[in-house]
Image (cartoon, rainbow, N blue to C red):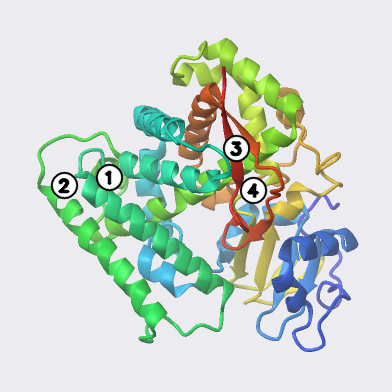
Amino acid sequence: MSETATAPKIKTGLPPAPKKSHWFFLNAWHLLKGPIEFFQESSAQFDGIFRITSRILNIVVLTDPEYVKHVMQDNNKNYIKWFKNDVLELLLGRGLLTSEGDFWRKQRRLAQPAFHKERLAKMADTMICCTQQQIEKLEKLPNKNNIDISTEMMELTLNIVAGAMFSSEVKGAIDVVSHEIERTSVMATARFNNPLRLPIRFPTPANLAERRSIKNLDDVMNPIIRERRKSTQHFDDLLSMLMEVKDEDTGEQMSDQQLRDETMTIFLAGHETTALALSWLWYLLDKNPVEAQKLYDEIDQVTQRRTPTLEDLQRMPYTRMVMDESLRMYPPAWLIMRENLAEDIIGGYRIPKGYTFMIPVHTIHHDPRLWEEPYKFKPERFSKENAKSHHRFAYFPFGGGPRQCIGNNFALMEMQLIIVMMLQKFRFKVTAGFEPQMHPMVTLRMMHGMRVDIKLRS
């Protein structure tokens, strides 16, 4: 693979495209039918850059970490998020996930202090409390076999982000927000998978249902923000942190609309990816008993089965290695998309403006040119010594560059606490006869959930 994003010699024409092609839909047919497999096969044929032929979009795929770095970091101002989902745009407004340019930079600057590690540490109690409640629920199940653990993890992470966002509001409001966020997320994913659906402004039954969900969210969220503005009480939660921060240059604070948009963004982005990451991790531990036992031993040795502290997490390097290796093998944000605002040169190819760039994170995480035995579960890849040898964009489950996920530290702390607390109590055994199938949509879901038998540890 190349060492620089741009080659000194300009090549003629566009990057090559795979020969595998449908007579009418061209390469795009195979991309839609099996994207993981198609990216994997095509990446092996080309040296870090190739084109996908389509009758709708002009698409370039990047799998060389240096080319990815060029787009996401070195020349990032030339690239915007490729975002064509009107449900999410209506839901998230101009939040960090959907905004661009100067407005995005201002919002990022305002929101960043709320996600500093010192402030996030205050939310550990919320994470521990919600996880303990979920453990008690699982312990009380009369039948612990054939349980969809992905649903349980989704419920847990939604409760955590709700508790972190609103420390004081009535539970009824949190229940409504959690329910409608989950519904809207499913609807947005369905729309992503079916580009032929009519835009949300058309009054079809499905579109009306989407609009109702978003209105229900607004009816709950907007009064909470207004009431919090009036309150003289101090709250240690994300809403207050976002409300209090001021722009260092102008002294400006977020408006109610900006607060609403960022709150919705945190809810949507802050629960599903973590829940999926945990579900895939339980699967990998069951399939790799030697590594699983090392993890159990470290957890037991450090915590002695008591509630973990943040200091404990610092003394559990193998837990973090397991987590990183799981995120490498099953990155929830499996595909990143960008669009170039102006012509650019990558890999020696001159790419006209307006192209769609696909960066298949899952493919890069499994590239044998970057990873030895990429399909084997080997947490030691992420030991302190070995991690130094990885290219910054050979492993990037939270993205990279200026638009790296703002909540990555929140997610990492949350995952570690959940892993430790759950594994103090349980072993998750994949139900006999069940094998999860990857279902790559907006996130890397499972086709039929993750069915496990829950075993109590002695």
Q: In the image, residue 353 lies at what x, y percent? A: 64, 76
C-alpha separation, residue under disc 4 versus residue under disc 1: 28 Å
Answer with mark 4 or mark 1, whichever residue precedes in sequence.
Answer: 1
Residue linked to disc 1: 239
Query: Residue at image x 86%, y 76%?
Result: 12
**Callout 1, which amino acid?**
Leu
Query: Is residue 202 toward the left or the right of residue 68 in the image?
Result: left
**Callout 3, which amino acid?**
Asp
Q: In the image, residue 232 lies at what x, y percent? A: 10, 39
Nearest to viewer (mark 3 / mark 2): 3
On screen, residue 387 above or below 283: above
Q: Secondary structure at mark 2?
A: helix
C-alpha separation, residue under disc 3 versus residue under disc 1: 38 Å
Nearest to viewer (mark 3 / mark 1): 3
**Callout 2, which amino acid?**
Arg
**Callout 4, which amino acid?**
Pro
Residue linked to disc 4: 331
